Amino acid sequence: MRDRLAQEKLYLENEIRTELNFEEIIGESAELRAVLGACSTVAPSGSTVLILGETGTGKELIARALHRMSKRKGANFIKVNCAAIPTGLLESELFGHEKGAFTGAVSKKFRGSKVVGPATTVFSVGADISATAFLSSFIGHGCSSQ
């Protein structure tokens, strides 16, 4: 009975995801329909996507919709607020560090992509130019400098 309920739950969750990929997004403008159409096109490709926009325009909602439609939908959806991480420590927080790499690094630390595995990661950088530059380099090369 328990296995049957688990299978039914999984089936219903998949049905909901299939029907409601854009359930959190409200609007009917031509511009929004164009964005949602682009999401439907790019999500299955596994490509890196850059979402730009002013504060409060729904960038995270679009990112969640892309995640739900992608091959990574069963994996984690991770949000990283880069503004909350001190300048110079972003790479360490995301990917870990070796003992002695900087003041306060008293032991080896694993983080981010080394532990998480496949996931969708959303970086909120705001006006932090150094974080933007680091993430642009990372995304462009697909690896950290470690």
Image (cartoon, rainbow, N blue to C red):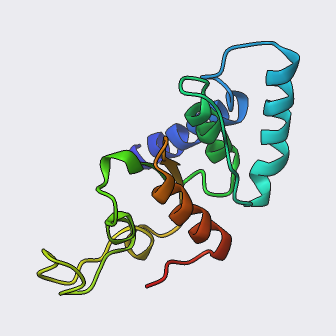
59 with respect to 40 (left or right):
left
Q: Is residue 14 visible?
A: no
Vertical order, 89 against 114 (above or below): above
Q: Position of residue 44 (x, y in %)?
A: 77, 54
Vertical order, 134 against 58 (above or below): below
Q: Position of residue 50 (x, y in %)?
A: 68, 49
Q: Quadrant of residue 8?
A: top right
- Observer-nearest of 7 and 75: 75
**Count the marks: how many?**
0
Q: Position of residue 82 (x, y in %)?
A: 40, 50
81 with respect to 118 (left or right):
left
In percent of the image, x 52 and y 49: which residue is there?
Answer: 122
Q: Quadrant of the N terminus?
A: top left
In percent of the image, x 45 and y 40: which residue is there?
Answer: 5
Vertical order, 117 against 37 (above or below): below
In percent of the image, x 47 and y 59: which residue is there?
Answer: 130
Q: Is residue 67 visible?
A: yes
Q: Position of residue 78 (x, y in %)?
A: 45, 51
- Observer-nearest of 117 and 135: 135
Q: Quadrant of the C terminus?
A: bottom left
72 with respect to 19 (left or right):
left
Q: Quadrant of residue 66?
A: top right
5 with respect to 55 (left or right):
left
In percent of the image, x 37 and y 63: which residue is there?
Answer: 90
- Observer-nearest of 25 and 95: 95
